[in-house]
Amino acid sequence: MNENLFTSFTTPVILGLPLVTLIVLFPSLLFPTSNRLVNNRFVTLQQWMLQLVSKQMMSIHNSKGQTWTLMLMSLILFIGSTNLLGLLPHSFTPTTQLSMNLGMAIPLWAGAVITGFRNKTKASLAHFLPQGTPTPLIPMLVIIETISLFIQPMALAVRLTANITAGHLLIHLIGGATLALMSISTTTALITFTILILLTILEFAVAMIQAYVFTLLVSLYLHDNT
C-alpha cells in the first residue's frame, strides 16, 4: 500500500477546516430520544444495556456518587460508539488522539478528586500517608503517592489510545499483507484474510471493552472520593 501507515490517524480536513467537531457530535445521532409509548427493538436494546451497565457500575456508590450516573453513562456511550464507528472503512477514530482522551480523562479525574477533598478531606489526605509509615520514609511516600495520584488521568488516556491505535495498525498491516499475497499465493492470502476477519471481530469487542474499562476506572476514582 502506498499510503502512510499513520494516514488514518491524521485529523480529516475540508477546505482547511478540521472535521473533528462534526465527527465527535455524530455518535449522538445514533441514540435518539423516543417519544413513543412502545419503543422499537433498537431503542429497547439500548435501554436494556444502559440499565444493565448502570446497575453494575453504580451499585457501589452512595447517593453523592450516584449523581454522576448520567455523566458516566453518556461517557461510555460516547466512547463505545466512537470506537465502533472508527472501525468502518475510511473513517476517523477520535479516541486514537491522546489529546482528546486527556481532554476526557483530566476533567473527570479532577472532578472526582475535588469532590473527595470537599466531602472527605481527612480521608483524602490520609491516602498520601499510609498508617504506620516509618518517620524517615514519610517524605518519600508522600512524593510517591502524589505522583501516583497525578498519573491516573494520564494512565486512563494512554490506555485507551494505545489499545485503539494498536488494533487499527494491526488491521491496516494485515489488510495490506492480504492484498500483497493475492498475487503470490492464494492459499496464504486466504489464511491471512481469515486472520483479518478474526482480528476485526476482536477489535469490535475491544472497542466496547475499552469504553467500559475507561468508564469503570473513572467510577472507581469517584468511589474512592465519595
Image: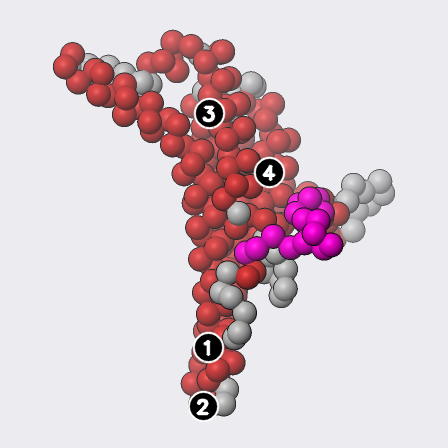
Q: Is there any visible trace of residue 28 in the rendered image?
A: yes
Q: CA distance from mark 1 to mark 2?
A: 11 Å
Residue 75 circle label: 4
Q: Nearer the viewer, mark 3 or mark 2?
A: 2
Label 2, secondary structure: give it: loop
Lower sequence index among marks 4 and 2 = 4
Whether residues under marks 3 and 4 lie with C-beta atoms below 8 angstroms apart, the answer is no
- Labels in figure, total: 4
Cα–Cα gap, marks 4 and 2: 46 Å
Residue behind mark 2: 184
Q: Earlier in the sequence, mark 3 or mark 2?
A: 2
In percent of the image, x 64 and y 55: which residue is there? 12
Residue 165, compared with residue 2, is above or below; it is above
Q: Earlier in the sequence, mark 3 or mark 4?
A: 4
Image quadrant in which you'd find residue 50: top right
**Mark 3: amino acid:** His
CA gap between label 3 and label 4 equals 17 Å
Q: Are marks 1 and 2 in contact (CB under 8 Å)?
A: no
Corner quadrant of residue 55:
top right
- Residue 160 in the image: state x and y as whole percent: 47, 46
Query: Horizontal and vertical percent for residue 2?
Result: 53, 74
Mark 3 secondary-structure assignment:
helix
> Which badge, 4 or 1, comes first in the chain's sequence?
4
Q: Which residue is mark 3?
A: 223
The residue shown at (82%, 45%) is 38
Which residue position holds label 1?
177
Image location (x, y in percent) of residue 216:
49, 37
Q: Nearer the viewer, mark 4 or mark 2?
A: 2
The magenta region covers: 9-25
